[in-house]
Image (cartoon, rainbow, N blue to C red):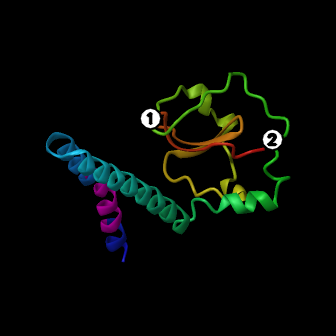
Amino acid sequence: MRKLIIMGLMAATMLPVAEQRDLDRAYRYGDQRDIRREQRDVREARQELREDRFDRDRAWGRNDWRGYRNTHRDLYGRGNWNAPFRYNNFRAGVRIAPGFYGSRYFIADPWRYRLPPARGFNRWVRHYNDVLLIDTRRGVVVDVYRGFFF
């Protein structure tokens, strides 16, 4: 079953690429009607990919913290938390300095906030109201939840 799901996800990620190739061909050899039809197909393929990713995340339990947060607002309150550096809008894949993910910023109990477990060298880190999953070996941001805390 797992192999089937992985193959389906791989095929879904290739769908927008194939649609983009058809759009490029329509620009080169087609008329205006062909171009509009291919643009619509590319938009639909990208929308399907976004929906598939959301469904996958929900099935794997990645987004279950949102509903829990709405019913336990006191747990996600910002509290008296200040950082000695300014806010940065990090995204996944960026390498950051060790000062941003020192041990004082680790979330020691991610299960309490319904975050997925951090495996290996990964750690959940609080950065203002955001939560970052950091690979502490390389200093790379693996995942970001924006606006996690109130």
| Amino acid of disc 1 | Arg
Q: Mark 2 and 1 residues: CB-CB less than 8 Å, in contact?
A: no
Q: What x and y, as percent, mark residue 19?
A: 27, 53
* Quarter in which the N terminus is drawn: bottom left
Q: What element carries label 1?
A: loop
Q: In this view, does 6 lie above or below 15?
A: below
Q: Does the magenta stretch include residue 13?
A: yes
Q: Residues within 10 Å of mark 2 (few under 14, many from 20)?
A: some
From the image, tell me which residue sits under label 2: 78
Residue drawn at (69%, 48%), measured in percent from left and top?
108
| Observer-nearest of 122 and 67 | 67
Q: Please give the name of the residue rendered at 37% of the width and 72% of the height, measured from the top-left corner.
A: 2
Q: Nearer the viewer, residue 51 or 139?
A: 51
Which amino acid type is marked by label 2?
Arg
Crowd tier of the residue under label 1, counting other residues whose Cα lies within 10 Å: few below 14, some 14–19, many 20 or above: few
Determine the image quadrant of residue 104: top right
Q: Identify whether 55 is placed above or below 81.
A: below
The residue positioned farthest toward the left in the image shown: 29
Q: Residue 69 occupies which quadrant of the picture?
A: bottom right
Residue 34 place in picture, x, y as percent: 24, 51
Look at the image and tell me in which quarter the C terminus lies. Answer: top right
Residue most extreme to the top: 85
Question: What residue would you read off at disc 1?
Answer: 138
Q: For the residue labelled by badge 2, is the local secondary structure a helix, a strand or a loop?
A: loop
- The segment highlighted magenta reads 7-17
